[in-house]
Each structure stands twice: as C-alpha cells, then as structure tokens.
Image (cartoon, helix red, strand yellow):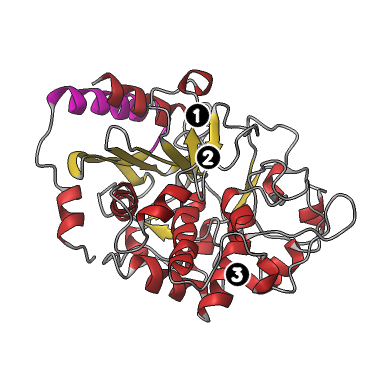
Amino acid sequence: MSHDAKTLALLNPTSDPQPISERINAVIDAALAEQRIVGATVLVALDSQSIYARAAGLADREEQRPMRLDTLFRLSSVSKVYVSVAALVLVRQGRLTLDAPVTAWLPEFTPEGPSGTVPSITVRHLLSHTAGLGYGFLEPADGPYHRAGVSDGMDRAEVTLAENVRRIGTVPLLFEPGTSWGYSLATDVLGALVERVSGLPLDEAVKILVTGPLGIADTGFTAADPTRLATGYVSEPSRPRRMAGMEIVPLPFMPEAEGLRMALDRAFDSKAFPSGGAGMIGTAGDLLLLLEVLRTGGEPLLTGALIDEMTTDHTVGMDLLPWPGRGFGLGFTILRNPGIAHSAETAGTWRLGGAYGHSWFVDPDRKLTMVAFTNAGLEGQSPGGRFPDELAKALYAA
C-alpha cells in the first residue's frame, strides 16, 4: 500500500472530539450487534483533518478475518466518481468538451430516441445521467437491456467494454437527452469515451489521469491484494447472507425490477471488462483522499471552474427516484432540500453510494467528508439502507 502524506493524515486522526467518537461508535456497534452489517470501515474528515477512523467487524465472517482500514472492497457505483473525474481531467486538458456530441469520439454510438430519430447525446448528458439511458437492474428480467445482452458491470459477462457499449447503443433511449433524469449505464459509455480520447485501456487511463497523480495505488479495476478483499454479503431479515458465485439481488424500492446481477468472482477475472459505472475495487481511504481533493478545489486534477461544474445541479426541475430532494451534478447527487430528502446534511451536500454496501458524502459548507464502506448490501448502501442515514445523523448531532 502506498499513500502520500496527505492520505496518512486523513487516516490518522489528529483530534478526536469525544461526542463524535461516541455517537459514531454507537451506530456501528448497534449495526454489528443487530447483525445488519458484517463489517465496516468508516472515515470522517473535517477541514482536511481526520476526526474519525475506525475499521470494525469482519471482512469475512466465515474465516473470521477482521476488517481493517486498508481492506479492499468491490466499489460498485463508487466507481462512477473516479471515471467521472477522469473524463473531467480530459476536459481540463482540452481533449474533451462537455457540450460536444459523444459521436465526435464514438461515432458508432447512436441509440434512437423515443421518436425513432437519433438525438445528440453530449458528454454533459452522460455525466449528469440525463442521456436517456437506463440500467438492466432497474427493468424486468425480460427488459430491453437484458434482451440486448447488456451487462450492468457487476456480473461476469464475457464481453469487451466496446461490445457492451455497442449493445447499449442498440436499445432505444427512455427519453430525449436533457429532458429528464435516469440513473443509468451512462458512466460505462463515459468509460468507453475516456478510452477513445486517451488512447488507453480504461484501467490505465484512470491510473494516469486520476489515481496516479494522487499517489493512490490500491484502487483500480483489479484487486491490488486479493487477500485484503472483503467478502460480499446480501442483507436479509435475520442477518447478512454470504453471497454465492452469482446473485440476483432484488431492490426493495423497485419490486417490479429484476434486481442487481452480482458476481463476487468478477473481481478475480482478469478478462472482465472495465465497467466505468461499477467495476472498480479499492479502499475507503483512497476515496476519502479523492473527495478531499475535489472539496478543496480539485488540484492537481481539476480546476475550480470544473469543480463548480461538477457540483452544480444539472437536473433542476427533474425528479430523481429513488433520491427525493436531491439533484445530480457531474458524477454524483447534490442535496437540494434536506427536509424532502429526510437528511441531516446541509443543502448542497454531494452524496452517492454503492450496491455492495457503501456510502459517502461531502458537505462543502461545513468542510466535512464521510466515507462508510461495508460488505453488506443493501444495508450499507445509500440509498436503501439504514446504516448511512444513522451515521450522518450521529455525525451532525455531534
């Protein structure tokens, strides 16, 4: 594991306000005692200083392997932050333009709109999930993405990134680009765009554009050390169940959808395509470092102007389900109305999660960042689980 001085400062608290420690410990201990989660790594930074860092519970219950601060996790949608930043680095370099059509670089990507014509999809549409694309896990088992053989990026589909994006492009759009919002495979298409513009495989491009400049060595599209990888569990009423080789995990807030197709073995498959939306593996500490870089202005990756673009709500007037009270920037949600969202956070807070049991948020007004990785989806996921909301309430109460 390789970390620079800033990362080490974030992982080693210099101060520990007792109320914060007590309240967050109580949330973690209760979730473990009630067997809602198996293990967790929770980090909190205030004004770039760590005020809380704890690894609790087990990375693997059956092997009694303890959770550690350097435990690796399958990131699922946490991957979107890294790939969105990679695309914006290319914008900073003048190699990509937010409002240019994607076909300028991916001329073969021409999905039809609802009217039967081929509309213009821009880079901004992909980053803000307003392109009209969807996700297989949000549709029935016989939905159009499943019929087209599209992978959501967490199964073991034997396709290349280029082939998966080609298949995505054969499915008609759900709405005209820019007219509505839908959580989608847009970041996978964005990953293909990053490949085409950079001339590099996506894993190498993310390393050169994002993780490398920050000294991050543990986060990428393969497990840096498989012995440190947390085992995945599925939340069930009694206690989390160890995931089988291939799972279809239903979504409680969308009973009509088939659910998430998840394969733990994908993390060990060297031939698995690099899914920009769900395919990365990494640590909580690495994500905390990246988020703090974004919160403090973006250097050495992005300019302040690009951070402003990234953290502006690009979905004004659109409803985001299942995120009431939130809008979407260029890569993550933006809190519009804490009351409607039933959130303890400040308006303007950035947040996203991951289906394997992860959540994170950045409150720029309070200079506050929290990363909470668990190995129990959906309890640890934001949205979906109690654990992320309980952590946020405990932190703000303190």
Q: Seen in the image, is 263 located left or right of residue 49?
A: right
Q: Main secondary structure of the magenta part?
A: helix
Question: Residue 364 at what x, y percent from top left?
Answer: 33, 38
Q: Seen in the image, is 287 located left or right of residue 329?
A: left
Mark 1 or mark 3: whose residue is earlier in sequence: 3
Question: Residue 83 at what x, y percent from top left?
Answer: 48, 61
Mark 2 or mark 1: whose residue is earlier in sequence: 2
Q: Tell me, yes or no, whether the two marked residues, 2 and 1, touch with CB atoms within 8 Å.
A: yes
What is the crowding at mark 2: few (fewer than 14 residues within 10 Å), some, or many (at least 20)? many
| Count of numbered labels shown in the rendering | 3
Q: Which residue is mark 2?
A: 313
Q: Amino acid at mark 1?
A: Arg
In the picture, residue 43 is in which quadrant? top left
Query: Which portion, as a residue range, is magenta?
Result: 18-38
Query: What secondary structure is marked by label 3?
Result: helix
Q: Is residue 283 above or below residue 47?
A: below
Residue 36 belongs to magenta span: yes
Query: What secondary structure is marked by label 2?
Result: loop
Query: What secondary structure is marked by label 1?
Result: loop
Q: Is residue 68 above or below residue 337?
A: below
Give me the residue at 55% from left, 36% from top.
327
Give me the residue at 31% from left, 30% from top.
28
Camera-nearest residue between 29 and 317? 317
What is the crowding at mark 3: few (fewer than 14 residues within 10 Å), some, or many (at least 20)? many
Spatial separation of the CA atoms under disc 3 and disc 2: 24 Å
Q: Which residue is mark 3?
A: 192
Q: Which residue is mark 1?
A: 336
Which quarter of the image is occupied by the N terminus? bottom left
Q: Amino acid at mark 3?
A: Ala
Give me the residue at 51% from left, 73% from top.
95
Mark 3 or mark 2: whose residue is earlier in sequence: 3
